[in-house]
Amino acid sequence: MSDVVPIKTQDFWVKVVEMLQQNWALIEPEGSKVTIYFLHDLGGVFDELTYSSLREAQAALRVNGFLRYDEDPSYAELFARPEPPFRRAQHPNGPIYSSGEFWSDS
C-alpha cells in the first residue's frame, strides 16, 4: 500500500513497544471529530481510530500508554520522529488498535 495520508499536525505521541520499536500517533482534526493515526517508525500509517473531541483522543492515548513526544526532552535524543509524507502501511499483526486487541477506552 502506498496511498499518501495527508496528516498536517506534527504533535507526535509515542509508545515504546519493544526495545528498538516505537508506535507513533498523530491526532488530526476532521470536521467535528478527530482521528488518531497510528504510524510505525518509517511513517507508515497502519491503523486509525476516530473520537468526538481532541480531549477524548488525548485521554485515550494516555490510557493506552502513549506519551506526548514534546513532554520529555530526552525523547529527542532517543527517538527520531517519522517524517512525512505518511503513507498507508500494513502492521504484521493487522489493525492492532482499532480491533481492540491492544486498545482500551477506559
Image: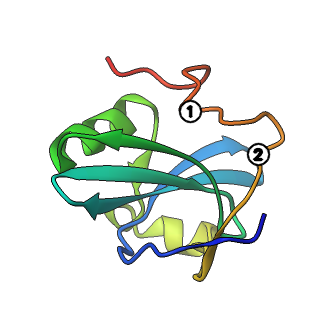
Name the residue tied to disc 2: 91
> Looking at the picture, does residue 36 appear above or below residue 73?
above
Q: Earlier in the sequence, mark 1 or mark 2?
A: 2
Residue 28: image location, x then y, percent: 33, 62
Q: CA distance from mark 1 to mark 2?
A: 11 Å
Relative side of 40 to 15, left or right: right
The quadrant where residue 87 appears:
bottom right
Seen from the viewer's position, the closer of residues 50 and 84 is 50
Residue at 57 percent across and 82 percent down: it is 84
Amino acid at circle 2: His
Q: Residues within 10 Å of mark 1 (few under 14, many from 20)?
A: some
Name the residue tied to disc 1: 97
Relative side of 8 to 65, left or right: left
Residue at 54 percent across and 21 percent down: it is 100
Q: Which element carries disc 1, helix, strand or loop? A: loop
Amino acid at circle 1: Tyr
Seen from the viewer's position, the closer of residues 83 and 52 is 52
